[in-house]
Image: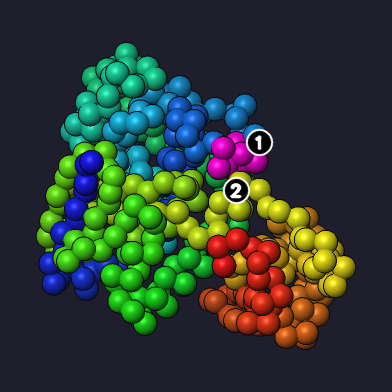
Amino acid sequence: MAVTRLVAGSGDLLRCRFATSPLWETAQAVRAFVDPRSRPYLRPWWERVRDRPPAAELLAVQSPRGYNPDFLCQPPEGAAPSIEAQLDAVRATPPEQVAAELRRVDPGHCVASAVVRVMIEDPGAARDRLADHVEDAWRRLVLPWWPRVRELIDADVEYRSRILAAHGLGHVVGGLHERIRWAGDAVVIEPAHEDLERPLGGDGLILMPSAFVWPSVTAVVDPPWRPTLVYPARGIGALLGGRAAAPAPLARLLGRTRALILTDLAEPASTAALAARHGLAPSTVSAHLSALEGAGLLARRRNGHEVRYRRTPLGRALAGGLMPGE
């Protein structure tokens, strides 16, 4: 069984950080068009986008089970870059790096290897066209879902940051995914595509929650990119894969809409996000949140410019058993 080990030195432990990446989410959404494995987990999203495939050139560089060019989903420099900044970084990739990565696309799995060979002949122009295709894919495949996706990703980072403060990095890494564990001085991914050991070498490690990688896990390990571990954000499968209706007993107790809102708050959320999810006016959601808060089922907490609501222990107890995994 192949194993990937990311070996950390003492300096690396001080440079581990969380990040979010709209560029990565776009790249993974594009992969769904050539790799069917994630589609059952993202079915409602897939049913809405399946007739809107990305550009043929972008699909041509996707290998269902092989290497995919890292420059199209390069790890972010900051904690939460904009898609515009990330696309600028793609367009700034040196042509020789683009060519080297395109040569690694497996022709045995490539959707259109002849198209890739043409791109290698002029990697600078190919890079710019691919960046344009990624931008178009972002707008059509990810942007409509981004506010809700970003909110759950932020909630994941907040949750794991509390674990980091209380228990340390080993506990955080061990809780990311069933294939990931902390062993001695290394992050271990098992099984992996190949046996690989990568010293972090002072670069640290980027921990990046993702919606569209769900339910798998992956790592970016090749220079010149920062070592990055991408894992499924908590609760994201329910967001993209469908949401169960509130159970009848809870609906009879609280009313259908309030029961739906309480059931939906497995992760903290804002009034605007809840309104978008349930197709309600923000003022209507606000009234229901106030009632649930007044009953002691919810508490509010400011996060930047937003106020997010979370279930209290009483709210969790009431919804306990209704939300698998809590």
Magenta span: predominant SS is helix
Instruction: Where is residue 219? Give x, y as percent.
Output: 29, 49
Q: Residue 240's mark?
A: 2
Q: Residue at x 77, y 78 (%)?
A: 292
Tell me the quadrant of the picture where the N terminus can be found.
top left
Instruction: Where is residue 70? Give x, y as percent.
Output: 29, 40
Tell me the quadrant of the picture where the C terminus can be found.
bottom right
Q: Quadrant of residue 92?
A: top left
Q: Is residue 260 left or right of residue 149?
A: right
Instruction: Where is residue 131? Give x, y as percent.
Output: 40, 36
Q: Residue at x 55, y 59 (%)?
A: 235
What is the magenta range?
A: 40-46
Q: Is residue 206 visible?
A: no
- Ranked by sequence position, the earlier of labels 1 and 2 is 1
Residue at the spot of label 1: 48
Q: How many marks?
A: 2
Q: Residue at x 28, y 19 (%)?
A: 107
Q: Is residue 252 visible?
A: yes
Q: Residue at x 73, y 85 (%)?
A: 296
Residue type at mark 1? Arg
Number of residues whose C-alpha sits closer than 10 Å to that of mark 1, classed few (under 14), some (14–19) or many (20 or more): few
